[in-house]
Image (tube, grey):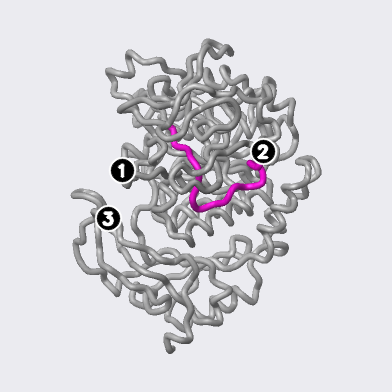
Amino acid sequence: MAASDRVPVPGSERRLTPGHERVGDVDPGQEIELTVYVRPRSAAQWVDAESARPPAARRLVSREDWADVHGASDEDLRAVTAFAHDAGLTVTAVHAARRAVALRGSLGDAVGAFGATMEGRFRAAQGTREYRARSGALSVPAALGDVVTGVFGIDDRPQARAHLRRLAAAAAAAATSYTPVQVAEAYQFPAGTTGQGETVGIVELGGGFSTQDLTTYFQGLGLTPPSVTAVSVDGGQNSPGTDPNADGEVMLDIEVVGAVAPGAAIVVYFAPNTDQGFIDAVSSAVHDSTHKPSVVSVSWGESEDAWSAQARSQMEQILTEGGGMGVSVTVASGDNGSTDAVNDGQQHVDFPASAPHALGCGGTSLQASGSTIQSETVWNDPGDGATGGGVSDQFPLPSYQSSASVPVNVDTQAAGRGVPDVCGNADPQTGYEILVDGAQQVIGGTSAVAPLWAGLIARLNEHVGSPLGFAQPALYPLLGSDSFHDITSGDNGAYFAGPGWDACTGLGSPNGTALAAAL
């Protein structure tokens, strides 16, 4: 096929990661798995139109009906399947609702099919895993130019990091710490609710959980251990002990959700730490018609500029689909302040927290006794991290933030999506008491806030009797009300807290009882 008969996949350009070491050539005979996403019918327009309605008047589409109403068309799926077959690739699954076609074949055939330029095998540092890297854009035949919206799996570099911060044992002994139950009490999670009848999904890109640890932990809190189900995505597995840092993330997420919403079932979606794995995991959770989570918690991310445009677009489309089916997705905003650990002298927000249909969760330092908050400030501790937050340079200002007085981006002076939307306790110096790999630890980070809010939303869903779904249109009208504790002290580097919404703590931390009444 002549080059003139092919067109680039929009936003598929990738660059090599600076500072990573090239360690060899790729093996064209290596068997790999790909995910090709195709265009939806009209999901984004439909969800945006529905979001303009009052929450009680919104019309949601069930997961079972989504494929017929807003999924991929049979014609588009057949076209991609035929192309893959002609390229020597095997179609292993077709998901109309998810708009996804799963392929398997040799790296050489995949490179030929999508016009990839491979650069070799790389690694970030000695001892880290090797990965395949490509550069430039991918391409498809011109007939598929309007059909294919993303191709993932040829490049398998690590995409995200877990947003948690541990305290050393000596520091933890001197610090203030809380059980998740105590944090929920401070935030007055609505009485008479437990999340009963709800399912919370959790996305993990490594690590695993020990059933024995969970039993010990919840019995120590006087709670019945929750039902926890592991789901494999793209070969990801529940693998406790292989990565202690990732284990900390997994156990933190499960233990926070299980403690603050003890009546909810929990489903953990394990996937590889790649853009393909991350996107497929969120897509699988949102569209899971077996377990049907009403809220999904994500505690992983990376700065916006570390993602390809096709990956950002695909993730935001999936989150939009979640909103259309009544699924809320809570996402940690990062633990490295307003730079998001990018050393270029600029400010960056973390993705997918910056996606307009994600509920971005920032962090505070909380001092509380029972249901009384004595003080709450922006989390920013030298050496221990700081809440992520800022103004996106990739997504425009969404309509739900039009009255929130979001400042312009301090670097570009342009308007953009403000991050985060909400906040909660994240400072490891006021952290959560968690059991990981048999050891008691104190852990903080915005990784704790995403499951905290997921548990709260499960209880709000139970209270209201219907799913909150795409939450921002319901939450932003409550700006300045008693539904939130307004955080007015502190900064995360370039942005400062103040009355109203701010780019450190968003609308504020929750008053769950007032939120339940308002919703």
- State left or right for residue 199 relative to residue 239: right
Q: Against 296, is 64 above or below?
A: below
Task: Residue 8: give its label.
Answer: none
Image quadrant in which the N terminus is located: bottom left
Q: Measuring 26% from the left and 71% from the top, which residue is drawn there?
A: 27
Residue designated by label 2:
403
Residue 297 percent across, percent down from the top left: 53, 40
Instruction: Determine the CA span between mark 1 and mark 3.
Output: 27 Å
Of the two numbered discs 2 and 1 in the rendering, the one whose residue sits closer to the viewer: 2
Amino acid tagged 1: Thr
Q: Measuring 79% from the left and 40% from the top, which residue is drawn there?
A: 56
Residue 470 versus residue 273: which sits nearer the camera? 470
Q: Give the range drawn in magenta.
A: 387-403
Residue designated by label 3:
18
Task: Residue 242: give its label.
Answer: 1
Of the two numbered discs 1 and 3 in the rendering, the one whose residue sits closer to the viewer: 3
Task: Tell me how many marks there are.
Answer: 3
SS at circle 2: loop
